[in-house]
Every structure is written in structure tokens, then in C-alpha cells.
Amino acid sequence: MNDRAFYIASAVAAVLIIVFSLVWPQGEGQPSPAPFGHAVTAPDYDRMVRDRSERQAREAQQKAAQIKSDAALHAEASSVSSSYAAARGAK
């Protein structure tokens, strides 16, 4: 083989291997730089934990609002009941 053809082919192969290493799929080691590869997303477990804590906080707020509403309704019903009993006792 001609030396000139061998060295050119070797240089081209080296450049192709370097370019290929830049776009190799992510998952082992550091992620690929910005123009190559894709964005790193949070694992499903982390997202699940975050969503669960947000849902529990939202449910706690709803439960507190429901308890406050029930207490207001109970107070109103109790005042209506006592006024009705007072009105019946006056007759």
C-alpha cells in the first residue's frame, strides 16, 4: 500500500472516530455537549417523588379547606338550630 494513501486514510479514520465519540449515545459517563446528544431528563423515580410530594401538599390544603368549611357549616347549623329551639320555647 502506498504510504500517502495509508496516512490519509488513517487521518480520516481518526477524525471520524473523534466525531463519532462526540455523538455517541449518552448514559455512560458525562453527557454529550450541547449541539450533540439530547437533553438530560430527570429519572422517573425523582419525578415520581416530586409529584407525590406536590400531590400530598395539595391534598393537605384541600383537606384543611374542607375542615374549615365543615366547621363553618356546623356553626351555622348549630346557630340556626338554637334560634329555632328558642323560637319554639317562646311559644
Image: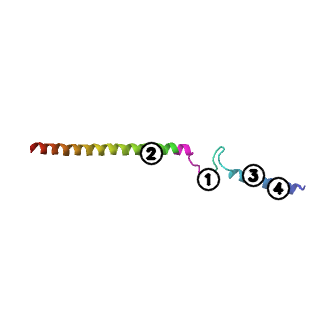
Q: Which mark lies nearer to you, 3 or 2?
A: 2
Going by the numbered disc 2, the residue's amino acid type is Arg
For this orientation, the residue located farthest to the right is 1
| Helix, strand or loop status at disc 1 | loop
Q: Quadrant of residue 7?
A: bottom right
Mark seen at residue 9:
4
| Helix, strand or loop status at disc 3 | helix
Q: Earlier in the sequence, mark 3 or mark 2?
A: 3
Asked if the residue at tag 1 contacts the one at tag 2, i.e. Cβ–Cβ closer than 8 Å, the answer is no
Query: How would you rate the neighbour count of disc 1 (Cα within 10 Å): few for under 14, some for 14-19, many for 20 or more?
Result: few
Q: Which residue is mark 3?
A: 17
Cα–Cα gap, marks 3 and 2? 48 Å
Residue extent of the magenta highlight: 38-47
Asked if the residue at tag 2 contacts the one at tag 4, i.e. Cβ–Cβ closer than 8 Å, the answer is no
Query: How would you rate the neighbour count of disc 2 (Cα within 10 Å): few for under 14, some for 14-19, many for 20 or more?
Result: few
Where in the figure is residue 67, as x and y percent of width and height?
Answer: 32, 42
Asked if the residue at tag 3 contacts the one at tag 1, i.e. Cβ–Cβ closer than 8 Å, the answer is no
Going by the numbered disc 1, the residue's amino acid type is His
Q: Which mark lies nearer to you, 1 or 3?
A: 1
Q: Which residue is mark 1?
A: 38
Going by the numbered disc 4, the residue's amino acid type is Ala
Residue visible at 63% across and 47% down?
31
Cα–Cα gap, marks 2 and 1? 29 Å
Asked if the residue at tag 4 contacts the one at tag 3, i.e. Cβ–Cβ closer than 8 Å, the answer is no
Where in the figure is residue 73, as x and y percent of width and height?
Answer: 26, 46
Q: Nearer the viewer, residue 43 or 72?
A: 72
